[in-house]
Image (cartoon, helix red, strand yellow):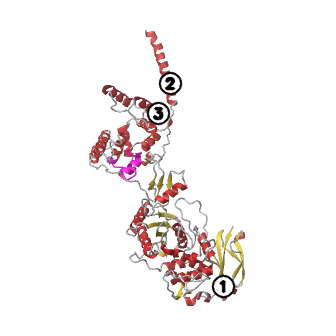
Amino acid sequence: MKRLWPFALAAALFVAAIARDATDRWIEGTQLPSVLPATSVEMRDRHGDLLRAYTVADGRWRLALHPDQVDKRFIDMLLAYEDKRFLRHSGVDPLALTRATLQAVKTGQIVSGGSTLTMQVARLLEESGTGQWAGKLRQIRVALALERRLTKEQILDLYLILAPYGGNIEGLRAASLMWFGKEPIRLTPAQAALLVALPQSPEARRPDRAQDAARIARDRVLARVARHGVISDEAAQAATSEPVPHRRIAFPALAPHLADRARNSFPDKLRHDLTLDATLQRKLESLATDALRGMGERLSIAILVADHRTGEVLTSVGSAGLAEDARQGHVDMTTAMRSPGSTLKPLVYALAFDRGLAHPETVIEDRPVAFDSYAPQNFDGQFRGDIRVSEALRLSLNIPVIRLTEMLGPANLMAGLSRAGVTTALTGGQPGLAVALGGVGVSLEGLVQLYAGLANGGQAVPLHWSTPDNDAKQPRITSRAAAWQVAHILTGIAPPAGATRMRLAYKTGTSYGHRDTWALGFDGAHVIGVWIGRPDGTPVPGAFGGDLAAPVLFQAFQRLKARATPLPPPPPETLILPNASLPLPLQRFGARSAAQADAPKLAFPPDGATLPLHGQALTVKLRDGVAPFTWLADGAPLVVGTHRREVALTGLGTGHVTLSVIDAAGRADRVRIVLE
C-alpha cells in the first residue's frame, strides 16, 4: 500500500486540476449583467453643489458616486459589519458561507446569507432574490466572475450606487441626501451606522415608517464596529443617543426651467456644471414667491441675475414655482417674448449720444408731435415743454424718445439690439417708430443681455449658464462714453418707496395695455432683470413697472450683496459740459437740421465694410465738415486737431471697430467696420 500512495496523490491532483479547470470554464462562461447602471442626471452650481437631480428611467433616485467621495469611516464600518474579508476573498467568503450553510442545515431555514459585498452586488445587478438556493448559486457564480473582471474598488463603487435604502432610494449618496440632507463625505458615526444597516432590510427599517426598527439596527451596527475597533466604545455609546431621522428630505429642485433647458440642450451629459449660485438661486426663488403674495393668483414672475463682467448667469427664476398651475408656473418667463415697454429707451439715448445727435444736457421739446399718422403720447398725457435729454430719460417721456428715434432711424435701433445679441420678434416687417416704446418682442433674457452690454461700457456681453462655446470678441453696441452717460443718467432715478438706497442704474417699463411690467438695473458688477405679468398675455389693470417690478429689483440686489459695487468713472473721451458750453448743434435738439448739410461725412471706408489691416494702419477719407477734426476708434481718440481730410490711422486691432470723426462744430459721422 505504501507504494501506491504516490499514484493516489497524483490521481487526486489530476482530479483537482480537472475540477479547477471546469470551475474556471464555468466562471469564465458567466454572462454578466450590465455593470454600468444608469445614474441620475445632475445639475451642479458654480461651486459643485447640487441644484437638481432627475430620477432614472424607472423612477428611482440613483446618484453617481465614487468611494473617494465617501466618508472613510463609513467604508470602514461597512466592511467591518458586512464583509470583513472583502479585500482578501475572490468574491465568495468560504468561512461565512460555511457558517451560513451549517446554520441552514441545523435550523431548516436560512438564518444568515453568508453573502459577501460582491455577492450582494451580483444580486443587485440582476435584481434577484436572496433566499433560494438556485439564486444563491447564481450570485456565487456572478460574484466570482465579477472579481475576475473588476477591481475591488469598482465592485465597491457598484455597491455604493445600487444598495437599496427604502422606497425609490438607491445608493449611498441618494440615501445620505434624502435622510440627512448632506453629501456622504462627512457623516457622524450614527449616520454612517444607519446607512450601513438600512440595505439589509430597506423597507422594514425605513426611518420614516419604522423608527424603532431603524434605531435598533443602527445600534447593532455601532456595537459590532466598536468590537472590531473601528470606533471607540465611548463614540458608539454616544452615537446611540443621536435621533433617527423621521422624514425624508426632498432633493434640491432649484432652477427647474433652466435645468430642463440644459438637459434638453445636452441630452447625453450626466453632469451639468452651471454658472448658477445655489444659495442665491434659493434666495431669489423665495423672493419670487413672496413678491406675488396677495397680488392675484394669475400673476407670474421671472428674475434673472448675471455678472456683466463675464456674462455668467448666477440666478434664473422662470416663475414662482412649477406647481403653480393658476400662474402657469411651467412657463419659463425668462425666455418668453414680450413687449419691453420703455426698457429700450436707454439704448435709443445711447445710440443718439453715440451719433452726435444729442448730449445729456441737450434741450429737447416735449410737445405734441405727429409723424404722418403716428402721434405719440406720454404715459401721463402731459407735456413738459423744453426739457433736458437726461431728465426726459429719467422721466421716461415718450415724445422725446420718439423724436430721437425718428432722427436715428428705427432700423439703427434694431441694429443696436442685434449687436447686443438680443433676439427680437417683429410683426409687420419693417420696424416703425413705436419700436422705441416696446413695439417689438424681446425676452427678459434678451433685455438683461442688453443692459449687461450697457453696463460693460457698451461692449456686448453674451449671457451663458454653462461653458461658453467660444471667447470671440463681441461687437460694440455703443461707445464707452455713450454707455457711461446713459448709466449716469439712470443712477439719478429715485429708488422705489421703501427700497434700500443702493446706487443702481435702473429703468422700469410697462407694456401697452398693462400686460408686462419690467425693471432692469445694474451696478459695477451685476445686472438684474425682473418681469411680472400674466403668461397668457392678458392685461393686469393698473400694473406699472415702477410699482410692481422695481421693488423686487432692489430686493434682489439686497439678497445678492450688502452694498452696490460702484459704477466706473467716465471714460476720458466723455464730453462732460453744461448746456451753454456744448457745441451749438448739441445745445438744442433739432437745431442741427440747417447745419447738417455740410456736416462731416466719411467717404471711406463705407459702413459695414470688411477690410484687411495692412501694416497696422488704415487710410480714412473725409468730405465736408469744418477743420480741425478728431478721429476716434470705439470712442478712443486716435488723431486730434488735424486739418487733413485723408489720414492713416494706427493703433487699430482686428475685429469689429466703430470709427468716428468730429469736426470743429461738434458734428459727427461714424461707420462700423470689420478689420482682418
Residue 186 can be seen in this image: no
Which element carries disc 2, helix, strand or loop? helix
Secondary structure at numbered mark 3: helix
81 part of magenta stretch: no
| Mark-to-mark CA distance, 1 and 3 | 86 Å
> Counting other residues with Cα less than 10 Å from the Cα at mark 1, is it few (<14), some (14-19), or many (20 or more)?
many
As drawn, the residue found furthest toward the top would be 1
Q: CA distance from mark 1 to mark 2?
A: 98 Å
Residue 450, placed above or below residue 325: below
User: Magenta stretch containing residue 187, yes or no?
Assistant: yes
Residue matched to label 2: 22
Q: Nearer the viewer, residue 281 or 132?
A: 132
Label 3 sits on residue: 142
Please state the horizontal and vertical placement of residue 275, each as a whole percent of the image.
49, 60
Q: Earlier in the sequence, mark 3 or mark 2?
A: 2
Work out whether mark 1 precedes mark 3 in sequence or the reverse, and give the earlier one. Answer: 3
Q: Amino acid at mark 1?
A: Asp
Using the numbered discs, state the Cα–Cα distance from disc 3 to disc 2 in whole angstroms.
16 Å
Q: Compared to 148, does 409 lie above or below?
A: below
Q: Which residues are magenta?
A: 165-191
Q: Tell me if I can see residue 305 in this picture.
A: yes
- Residue at which label 1 appears: 663
In the figure, is residue 227 to the left or right of 529? left
Local packing at callout 2 (Cα closer than 10 Å; few below 14, some 14-19, many 20+) is: few
Q: Which mark is residue 434?
A: none
The extreme bottom residue here reads 580
Residue 465: give x, y in percent of width and height.
Answer: 52, 61
Amino acid type, mark 2: Ala
Foreground tag (1 vs 3): 3
From the top left corner, tell me how far across and down residue 91 is, in percent.
Answer: 44, 33
The residue nearer to you, when weighing 271 against 471, is 271
